[in-house]
Image (tube, rainbow, N blue to C red):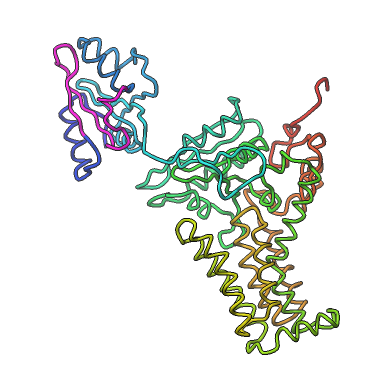
Amino acid sequence: MGDISTDLKQNEKRVREMIEGCDDILFRPMKLGKNKEISCFLIYIEVAAGNMMLEDSVIGKMLNHMWEMDESGIQKAIEENSLGVSDTKELVSMDEAMAAMLAGNVVLFVDYFDKAIKIGSKGYPGTGVMKADSEKVLRGSKEAFSESVKVNTALIRKRVRDTALKVKETPLGKYSNTMCAMVYVDGLVYPPILENLEKRLEDFEIDGVLDGGVIEHLTADLKYSPFPQYQATERPDRAAMAVLEGRVVLVCDNSPEALVLPATCNSLFQTSDDYYRHFAIVSFLRIIRYMGAFLAVSLPGLYLAAVNFHTQLLPTNLIFSLAEAREGVPFPALVEVLLLELSFELLREAGLRMPGPIGNTIGIVGGLIIGQAAVSANIVSPVVVVVVALTALGSFAVPNEELSEALRLLKYLMLVLCAGFGILGIMFGWLLVLIHLAGLKSFGVSYLMPFAGKDANPEGEARDSILRAPLSRMWKRPLFARRQNRRRMRMKGE
């Protein structure tokens, strides 16, 4: 498309051709000036802009002023924005005009003026700021991100009130033109990380980006790894903490979650209220989370190894109890565990997809009923029910949902290895996992930081890993921040 013409009729013809068949896009012609001698027209999405002429809006006020002006006053008002209307922008091409209109703004075309005027309006409807649901905390803000990229960046700026906080927007998607924004603190972030992210966003072309998860999987370092290489969060305070550590937050329109990068295994076990509570309590809870992750992966496999290969490791009374519990069960131990594990996965998925409170009921009541019925029918032993329940609790203790899902997948690998090789199988399985994690990187940062390479920044990483030091001793930022700007706290007078 070429530039916008000074001939309004020509502009009108091109616009009508482009919006033909789009009944939700309104075309409103009108006359301006005292003698109604200047023709113009507006284009806008019906729901996004609403009945702006009848509302007491900035757009309505601007047009009301122009109805009383003469021709020269209108030209001056448009060229110089002498009316002081906020959020206006001159657009020099028809492509820019269409993009602005499709973003939810109003676009004004005026006769004899070779530019279109973008006027900000209320935009597309969407959910407002809501309560955090998936990342619940005992202390701290209860706000969660919304589905508007503008609202989400504002929620981060609300917490980091400095012009060093930069917001760089870029549209993605050939047809969706979804607005995404990179949020970071200039001076803390490493420029190569920003350049790497920008390059990855430019490397692919896709019809539409409808959620941040599309970007996450298209730009990951190792696309076949089940481990998340971005840290997804719905909490603005968690995102604000990330940018103050020198990381980048990627927010995407229509997505109520932000993506934090680089991500490490350690950061995925942390929650925002870890920094609002006493360090001893936080350290204890982090140990519980790591133990839960180990149980989520290893407990069913350890049960199989003990029952099938290494009964000598168990006390005699426990061996007799296991043998008595399995008496009458027609399946091998592997089939027994797999049957109950897959049943629990089915219950979890059904509870997630069922509407409203019915979903919670399905998960709790269904688990109790099916477990009890399976034990009564001698399909599974009571010990397996306990093992599967503890495994599920362990996965629920992991605060990051995507990491929890990866651990649930690894559980089945461990089951197969332990069924074939006993305790050696689980050792071999964890060796494979650690080798994979040691080679995995998120935007150049090792996934096992600070457990690998902690000597690079001991005051920053080692004091905020499984154990958390008191805040007064955490005076250095993590490795994410630039080396010369890693000090984040000092006593006054130093």
Q: Position of residue 221 (x, y in %)?
A: 59, 54
Q: Is residue 6 left or right of residue 381?
A: left
Membership of 337 in magenta stretch: no
Residue 339 placed where, x, y %? Answer: 59, 78
Residue 246 located left or right of residue 365: right
Span of residues in magenta: 27-56
Q: Position of residue 107 (x, y in %)?
A: 29, 29
Quadrant housing residue 492: top right
Would you say residue 52 sits in the magenta stretch? yes
Looking at the rendering, in which quadrant would you find the N terminus?
top left
Q: In screen coordinates, is 117 left or right of 35?
A: right
Q: Residue at x 69, y 73 (%)?
A: 300
Asked whether 320 or 225 is in front, the reply is: 320
Q: Residue at x 19, y 22 (%)?
A: 111
| Quadrant, the C terminus | top right
Which residue is rendered at x = 58% and y = 25% of the image?
Answer: 163
Q: Position of residue 81 (x, y in %)?
A: 34, 16
Q: Quadrant of residue 125?
A: top left
Indicate whether 164 appears above or below 312: above
